[in-house]
Image (tube, rainbow, N blue to C red):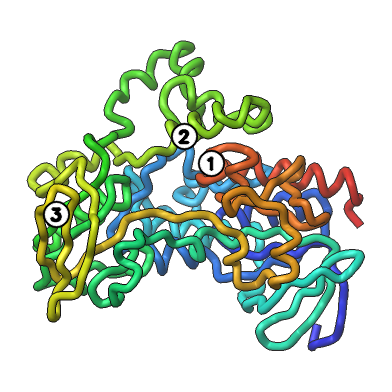
Amino acid sequence: MNGKSQTCHVTVIGAGPYGLSSAAYLRVAGVETRVFGEPMAFWENQMPVGMCLRSNWGASHIADPKHALTLDEFVRQKGNHISKPIPLNRFVDYGRWYQSQAVPNLDRRHIRSIQTDAPGFKVTMADGEEFTSRRVVVAGGISPFVSKPPEFADIPCALASHTSEHKDLGKFKGKRVVVIGAGQSALESAALFKELGIPVEVIARTNHLNWVGLHARLHHLGLISKMMYSNRDVGPAGISRLVAAPHLFRRFPRVFQDRTAYRAIRPAGAGWLAPRIAEIPITLGRKVVSATVAGSQLRIRLDDGSERLVDHALLATGFRVDVSRYPFLSPSLSKQVKTVNGYPVLQRGLESSVAGLHFVGKPAAWSFGPLLGFVSGAEFASNELARAITRRNGSN
């Protein structure tokens, strides 16, 4: 476009599973779409090497409208076996292959800002190009939403850091590490530390560890299993079916939605991790009450009065959605988005209170349920998005 002001119908920001899937559905629907971002960037750069996906094979396909760009088709075309559980690096390879097939003209440039500009939005690129877009789909992922306990707020990153800040845990060789958390990220990080020969302890508030996938036989009971579990692979028996139907889920009272959502996504590890952490010291039912710098080390005090002197604390403390933290949304635009606890309040089509501004992925979870925080939720989101946009605006 060479810096000239132009107009497009839909701009998609982000090139992870949700951004790529959204673009694929919109383009098949005949909607002019521009897509921006580095393909699978978060998965490649902000998750440690050696990790595997917790989701099963069937729930790890990136949705496409023709159901042709599956993991199985990727393996068939590349002639390259993928083990189970799915290694992170192989999923990244798959995502990039998907992009090459579904969104070959992906624009890898960064967007500096999005501002309202009736009847749509003004999009300003990092290199100065500007254009207008009738609609914007935010598929920016969770990277801006890192959540750290307040006790670690003033600790330098050399002594305490979030799991998303590391690609190679091997950098901690020769150090003693404590992992804070009890979910998949915490437990798998601890397993990787152990396997690298790095002394590690896990500390978590929960009184017991939760596991998923320990009762595989429950998924092989024919019709009974289909009644209990959805192939989306989110949540335990019963709840799995409910959260797989977002339009039904959102009809329930808010209190029920919140309780059910937590039950579906509470901190838990995949069953295949259990043997790998068997010999790791794990302290449960304890909360960190203070963290202080002690020379070149970190002193951590727990609520039972005990202390740990370590070289580093790895915070596997998750992410807290707050869409105002997306750096490309101008402050004036962010203020117009109606939110609850940082989540945008969305209507049909995953459209926010700002007409034409849509959110997919984890930010949509408050309005449509926990399924939207997982790869398997991209099919619902992309279908919903494409149907709404073509229905309301046509495909021209």
Mark 1 burial class by Cα count in 10 Å: few <14, some 14-19, many 20+: many
Mark nearer the viewer, 1 or 2: 2
Q: Which label sits on residue 201?
A: 3
Residue at (57% x, 50% y) in the render: 341
Q: Are marks 1 and 2 in contact (CB under 8 Å)?
A: yes
Q: Is residue 32 left or right of residue 260?
A: right
Residue 174's x, y, as percent?
9, 73
Q: Look at label 2 and name its amino acid.
A: Val
* Mark 1 and mark 2: Cα distance apart in space: 8 Å
Q: Are marks 2 and 3 in contact (CB under 8 Å)?
A: no
Q: Which label sits on residue 234?
A: 2
Q: Look at label 1 and name its amino acid.
A: Ser
Mark 3 burial class by Cα count in 10 Å: few <14, some 14-19, many 20+: many
Q: Look at label 3 and name its amino acid.
A: Glu
Q: Is residue 210 left or right of residue 252?
A: left
Nearer-N-terminus badge (2/3):
3
Residue at (73% x, 41% y) in the render: 384
**Relative vertical location of residue 258 with respect to residue 226 in this rendering, above or below:** below
| Element under disc 3 | strand
* Mark 1 and mark 3: Cα distance apart in space: 32 Å
Residue 225's x, y, as percent?
44, 17
| Element under disc 2 | loop
* Mark 2 and mark 3: Cα distance apart in space: 28 Å
Residue at (66% x, 70% y) in the render: 36
**Relative vertical location of residue 391 with respect to residue 176 in this rendering, above or below:** above
